[in-house]
Image (cartoon, rainbow, N blue to C red):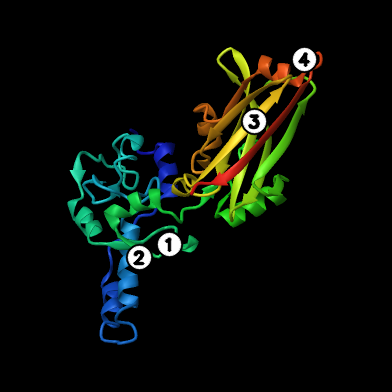
Amino acid sequence: MATGSPYFDDMRSKSEVIDPPTNEDMMDISEHVNDPAQKALKPNLTVSSSVRELLECPVCLNAMYPPIHQCSNGHTICSTCKPRVHNRCPTCRHELGNIRCLALEKVAASLELPCKYQSFGCIGIYPYYNKLKHESQCSFRPYNCPYAGSECTVIGDIPYLVAHLKDDHKVDMHNGSTFNHRYVKSNPHEVENATWMLTVFSCFGQYFCLHFEAFQLGMSFVYIAFLRFMGDDNEAKNYSYSLEVGGNGRKMIWQGVPRSIRDSHRKVRDSFDGLIIQRNMALFFSGGDRKELKLRVTGRIWKEQ
């Protein structure tokens, strides 16, 4: 690849060449070693910060994990980004080859770092190579906004998301563990995978999201209603709910366990984990000339003993 490639020029503009510590840097650390007020704090923070920068991939800027690759000049890159740069070092443009930076991998193994969700309340300190696994399961990691009517990218803890749903999405908020909702649509033959309604219920000191929407299942149009728990899955299993829809002397009943909002709205819907009503049945329940959808969905939430 040519030396003047704009691709590598762009890569260099997003990366930073990290120089090894200078003698002045080492002196700065040693000067504080015998200072009782700084002994346990500043040297460790300085070294930790420096090493963490060395462990940052210059391309994706994420932390690097074995195998960590390096070029003949010692510039490192993560294994995910190596094929993306066509085996060329994004810093000096030399060929990367298959050189492992074992020294940096060993340094990483000696580190213990705080969880990245420290600001959300996690106080744990974890070995470098265990930190990623912990963070993927950390109970303090923020939740995604459960609103399904748009691609909302807001994240936060439960109180923040409840306020966000109320203020920004104008979602209906209800207190109590029972509900009785009526869904009306003048032209039920127009189904465009659209979410129709999200309602938030507060009961048992928790929050629950009731979803009702229309979507296409194979060649058929169907409606689905399901409940999601605003919290983790292990807490969601402490609750159950029932949904009922009917008309003209017939009814359908669904009973299940609410899914955690850790599971996306689409994942729950596509697993059919809820009350599913075929369009023809929904129009039958609606009565009249079957040209207007008028569904009444009732239900309740209860805590398992």
- Name the element at disc 1: loop
Q: Pointer 2: residues within 10 angstroms few (<14), some, or many (20+)?
A: few
| Label 4 close to label 3 by CB (< 8 Å) | no
Distance from disc 3 to disc 1, alpha carbons, whole Å, reads 40 Å
Tag on residue 93? none
Residue at mark 4:
290
Judging by the rendered image, the residue that carries numbered circle 1 is 122
Distance between mark 4 and mark 2 Cα atoms: 67 Å
Depth check, mark 3 against mark 1: the one in front is 3
Near-viewer residue (243 or 258): 243
- Tell me which residue sits at (23%, 50%) in the image: 73
Q: CA distance from mark 4 to mark 3?
A: 20 Å
Q: Are marks 4 and 2 in contact (CB under 8 Å)?
A: no
The answer to whether residue 229 is left or right of residue 110 is right
- How far apart in space, not on screen, are marks 1 and 4 (Cα)? 54 Å
Q: Is residue 193 visible?
A: no
Question: Of the numbered discs in the image, which one, if any, rests on residue 49?
Answer: 2
Asked which secondary structure carries label 2, the reply is: helix
Report the residue marked by disc 3: 244
Which amino acid, mark 4?
A: Arg
Please state which amino acid type lies under the numbered disc 3. Glu
In space, the residues marked 2 and 3 are separated at their CA atoms by 57 Å
Residue type at mark 2 is Ser
Q: Position of residue 104 (x, y in %)?
A: 23, 55
What is the secondary structure assignment of the residue under circle 3? strand
Quarter where residue 157 is shown = bottom right
Looking at marks 4 and 2 on the same chain, the residue that comes earlier in the sequence is marked by: 2
Name the residue rendered at 39%, 38% in the picture.
4
Q: Name the side, left or right, on which 156 lies relative to 99.
A: right
If the image is split into quadrants, where does the N terminus sit? top left
Q: Position of residue 23 (x, y in %)?
A: 25, 73
